[in-house]
Image (cartoon, rainbow, N blue to C red):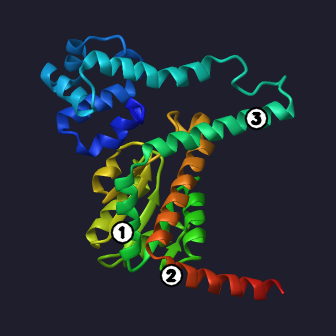
């Protein structure tokens, strides 16, 4: 199996039936407990038939529920080991070199997790929406407004149709004037903020398209998105994961940018040449 079972469930989530999503939701929220319960207990917890659990396992390419629990244990073990490893957290006795190494290791883990959560199909769909859009608005709230700003800064060197707005009032104004074919690239770890849910309603009413970058496939806003790109750490963003969430989302920005340029290389190169020339003259 290429990707671990947790990443595979996230990848296949949109293809699951409603009953299968109940199983996936429970397993993702109870990764430790699921390793030790029976198939009957899991079906009861999820309110589905035992046969549905068996079909769910086979859809993931496994022979049965016992294989599923084995793969789940393998997926959870590295995270458990990292948490229990002596010295994995930064302590007062660490040297500066040790701090540098631990921060690097955490960032590498974040990027690796982000890679496994993305799928080729969703990345391709998002890049095509960006390519076809008349204009693209990059948005985010709180810390994620920084990611939206970075996305606009990166994409604006390849096309003039990208923009961003930091003020929440002006975000609503811009969204309310979108046209069919326009797109919004929205960054939200939870996918459940009040501002995002309001934005989804406005975007849909205007006939525009929404690309949502979030951690949770079943978040309230995901149902209203045209494409959902999953990324982010497992912990809550306001505990230990806020920086990790930003790193993961910036990785998604770079992937989308690279795919966007790959699909329209000549236009991107012309714009980059123009930007480079203007910046060179400014620095002289």
Ranked by sequence position, the earlier of labels 3 and 2 is 3
Mark 2 vs mark 1: give the one in front: 2
Which residue carries the number 3 mark? 101
SS at mark 1 in the image: helix
Residue drawn at x 32%, y 71% is 208
Cα distance in 3D space between marks 3 and 2: 40 Å
Q: Do labels 2 and 1 touch, CB within 8 Å?
A: no
The image position of residue 204, as x and y in percent, is 28, 66
Residue drawn at x 34%, y 60% is 200
Residue drawn at x 23%, y 24% is 46
Of residues 205 and 268, the one nearer the viewer is 268
Of residues 224 and 168, the one nearer the viewer is 224
For the question of whether residue 49 can be seen, the reply is no
The image position of residue 186, as x and y in percent, is 45, 60
The image position of residue 164, as x and y in percent, is 53, 71
Q: Residues within 10 Å of mark 1 (few under 14, many from 20)?
A: many
SS at mark 3 in the image: helix
Quadrant of res 15: top left
Which residue carries the number 1 mark? 129
**In which quadrant will I find the N terminus?**
top left
Q: Residues within 10 Å of mark 2 (few under 14, many from 20)?
A: few
SS at mark 2 in the image: helix
Residue drawn at x 20%, y 19% is 43
Quadrant of res 242: top right
Ranked by sequence position, the earlier of labels 2 and 1 is 1
**Whether residue 2 is situated above or below residue 164 in the rendered picture:** above
Of residues 73 and 215, the one nearer the viewer is 73
Instruction: Tell me, for residue 266, which label it has, or none.
Output: 2
């Amino acid at each position: 199996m290429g990707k671990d079972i947790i990443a595979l469930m996230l990848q296949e989530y949109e293809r699951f039936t409603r009953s299968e999503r109940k199983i996936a939701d429970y397993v993702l929220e109870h990764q430790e407990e699921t390793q030790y319960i029976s198939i009957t207990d899991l079906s009861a917890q999820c309110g589905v038939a035992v046969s549905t659990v068996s079909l769910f396992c086979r859809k993931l390419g496994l022979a049965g529920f016992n294989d599923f629990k084995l793969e789940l244990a393998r997926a959870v073990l590295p995270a458990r080991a990292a948490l229990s490893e002596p010295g994995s957290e930064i302590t007062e006795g660490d040297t500066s070199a040790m701090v540098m190494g631990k921060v690097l290791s955490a960032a590498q883990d974040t990027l690796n997790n982000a890679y496994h959560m993305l799928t080729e199909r969703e990345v391709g769909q998002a890049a095509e929406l960006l390519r076809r859009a008349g204009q693209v608005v990059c948005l985010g709230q709180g810390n994620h407004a920084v990611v939206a700003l970075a996305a606009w800064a990166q994409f604006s060197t390849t096309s003039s149709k990208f923009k961003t707005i930091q003020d929440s009032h002006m975000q609503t104004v811009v969204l309310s004037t979108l046209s069919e074919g326009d797109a919004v690239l929205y960054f939200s770890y939870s996918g459940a903020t009040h501002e995002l849910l309001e934005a989804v309603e406005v975007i849909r009413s205007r006939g525009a398209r929404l690309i949502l970058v979030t951690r949770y496939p079943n978040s309230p806003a995901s149902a209203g998105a045209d494409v959902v790109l999953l990324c982010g750490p497992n912990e809550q963003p306001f505990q230990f994961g806020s920086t990790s969430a930003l790193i993961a989302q910036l990785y998604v920005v770079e992937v989308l940018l690279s795919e966007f340029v790959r699909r329209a290389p000549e236009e991107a190169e012309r714009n980059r040449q123009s930007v480079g020339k203007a910046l060179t003259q400014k620095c002289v």
